[in-house]
Image (cartoon, grey):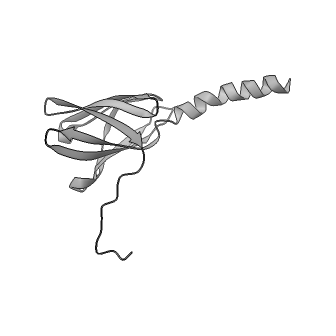
């Protein structure tokens, strides 16, 4: 009986932990021609449909850019930033969001991994 209850609890916990996989900070390097930019998304997945997201481009000093979430689920995302004429769609596979970044009619692959944005070097800060 204990084994059955343990198995049932384990099975019930899988969807809960899976649903939270898209939560948090995800980052990737966008290779757009001769330029590489770190792109960071902060996802806040809510089962009730009130999910939110923000975008950072640290190298350009652009932080907390509002994102229009078209779709955010436990394993996929579709979003746009109208002010930048930019869109991104991706699907979570093996711990990586594999997706496509679109801007000004051009498409580039952009894969995201969980983690915080790289902090810029600050030579004026004491070590």
Visible residue check, residue 62 = no
Q: Position of residue 17 (x, y in %)?
A: 58, 34
Residue at 33 percent of width and 74 percent of height: 125
Taking the image as shown, residue 87 lies to the left or right of residue 73, namely left
In which quadrant will I find the C terminus?
bottom left
As drawn, 27 above or below 8: below
Residue at the (36%, 52%) spot, across then down: 117
* Rendered image quadrant of residue 25: top left
* Whether residue 26 can be seen here: yes
Q: In the rendering, at what x and y percent does residue 22 appear?
A: 46, 36
The residue drawn where x is 43% and y is 37% is 51
- Taking depth in this image into account, of 124 and 11 the one nearest to the observer is 124
Q: Residue at the spot x=42%, y=47% of the render?
A: 115
| Quadrant containing the N terminus in the rendered view | top right
Whole-percent x and y of residue 19? 53, 32
Determine the residue located farthest toward the right in the rendered image.
1
């Amino acid at each position: 009986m204990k084994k059955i209850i343990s198995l049932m609890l384990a099975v019930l916990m899988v969807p809960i932990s899976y649903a939270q996989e898209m939560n948090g900070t995800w980052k990737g390097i966008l290779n757009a021609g001769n330029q590489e930019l770190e792109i960071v998304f902060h996802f806040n997945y809510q089962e009730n449909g009130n999910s939110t997201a923000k975008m950072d481009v640290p190298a350009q000093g652009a932080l907390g850019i509002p994102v229009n979430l078209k779709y955010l689920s436990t394993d996929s995302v579709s979003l746009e930033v109208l002010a930048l004429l930019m869109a991104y769609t991706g699907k979570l596979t093996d711990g990586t969001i594999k997706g496509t970044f679109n801007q000004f009619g051009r498409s580039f692959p952009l894969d995201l991994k969980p983690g915080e944005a790289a902090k810029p070097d600050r030579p004026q800060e004491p070590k």
